[in-house]
Amino acid sequence: HGHATGDACLRHLASTIERNIRKSDWFARWGGDEFVVALWDAKDPSGAEAVVYRIAEELRRNSARLPRGVEERLSVSAGIAWYRGGEGAQKLFERADAALLRAKRQGRGKIDRAT
């Protein structure tokens, strides 16, 4: 669909994420269509799942406005990894990436937890 369409989708997703996380949390584009969301001081993995469900619900309710006035609903798949004490960042991201790949294999709009 072209770069302008991709850019509009990325901006829509980024603004949706920003509205659904706390000021103390952060997110960054990891590459391509992947983002990392860090939820500081979250109590357990269910809190991360709740954030993903809020983002997914907002995406379902609010279509992205694309070039030429076209609107498109976006979906989100997520891999959730929880920091384990003493675990390095590389291992944490590897577990998150593996969970994301499992979620994507299940189809659009799926969530998987890291093992």
Image (cartoon, helix red, strand yellow):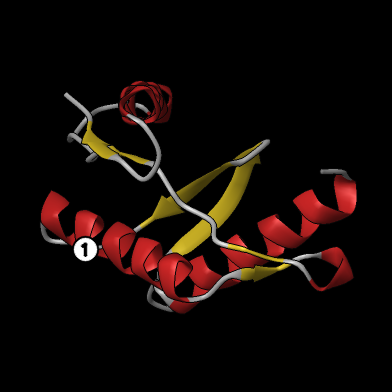
Residue placed at 68% from the left, 36% from the top?
32
Residue placed at 35% from the left, 68% from the top?
57
Residue 5, image quadrant: bottom right
Q: Is disc 1 placed on a helix, strand or loop? A: helix
Residue 40 in view? no
Residue 27 picture location, percent across and down: 52, 57
* Residue nearest the observer in this picture, 20 or 108: 108
Residue 37 picture location, percent across and down: 44, 53
Residue with the mark numbered 1 = 50
Q: In this view, does 102 lie above or below 52?
A: above
* Residue nearest the observer in this picture, 64 or 92: 64
Query: Mark 1 Cα within 10 Å, few/some/many (few <14, many 20+)?
Result: few
* Residue nearest the observer in this picture, 24 or 79: 79
Q: Is residue 2 left or right of residue 8?
A: right
Q: Is residue 91 above or below residue 54?
A: above
Q: In which quarter of the image is the N terminus?
A: top right
Residue placed at 62% from the left, 47% from the top?
29
Residue 19 picture location, percent across and down: 47, 78
Q: How many labels does the image show?
A: 1
Residue 23 picture location, percent across and down: 44, 78
Residue placed at 52% from the left, 71% from the top?
16
Q: In which quarter of the image is the C terminus?
A: top left
Residue 16 in view? yes
Amino acid marked by disc 1? Ala
Residue 55, image quadrant: bottom left
